[in-house]
Image (cartoon, rainbow, N blue to C red):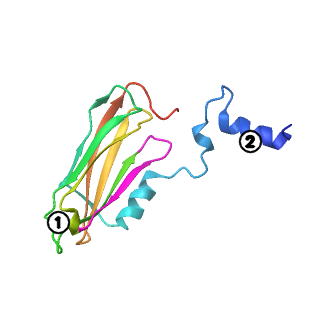
Amino acid sequence: MLSTSASLALASFFGINGAINSRAFAAVEDIETLINDFTQGNTLQTGRVVLDIPDVAENGFSVPMSVTVESPMSHDDYVTSVLVLAEENPNLRISTFHFTPASGRASVSTRMRLARTQDVLALARMSDGSYHKAVKAVKVTIGGCGV
């Protein structure tokens, strides 16, 4: 049998209807903090990053996404990493991809979950210390994160 404190903890995590309460996640990260941590306080420029994601996602459980960063990918000028964020998901970080000049291209394709209609951001860190971004609004008809 559970103690009263354990029962209260479970009730706050699962909520009244048994669904996971998104506020129960231990460290809900602020999107501005994540962006600042990634860019180390540097200014984000638009351009060079292409975020390909549908305008409307019929099902948020599996949303196709690709990110391409325009770069020669030479030893002197290349993409070091790309961070993808979804500002309304319980976990804002979708993924981080790392590149080297040996990657040949800074391009990835995957699928992700989206909880609800929101902006998706792709941030790129370049070897010269510059940072670039692309933002795309996605309308989600059926949420995919259980919230």
Residue 6 shown left or right of residue 77 in the figure:
right
The residue under label 2 is which amino acid type? Ala
Closest to the observer, 19 or 88:
19
> Residue 62 location, x and y as percent?
37, 34
What range is drawn magenta here?
A: 87-100
Total numbered circles: 2
Residue at 38% across / 27% down in the picture?
A: 59
Residue at 44% across / 40% down in the picture?
A: 88
| Residue position for label 1 | 73
Q: Secondary structure at mark 1?
A: loop
> Residue 26 location, x and y as percent?
61, 50
Along the polypeptide, which appears first: circle 1 or circle 2? 2
Q: Secondary structure at mark 2?
A: helix
Q: Where on the picture, by quarter, is residue 75?
A: bottom left
Rate crowding at label 1 as few (under 14), some (14 to 19) or many (20 or more) other CA atoms within 10 Å.
many
Q: Is residue 102 above or below residue 97?
A: below
Which of the image's four quarters has the N terminus? top right
The tag on residue 9 is 2
Residue 62 shown left or right of residue 76 in the figure:
right
> Residue 132 location, x and y as percent?
25, 58
Residue at 50% across / 42% down in the picture?
A: 90
The residue under label 1 is which amino acid type? Met
Residue at 50% across / 52% down in the picture?
A: 29
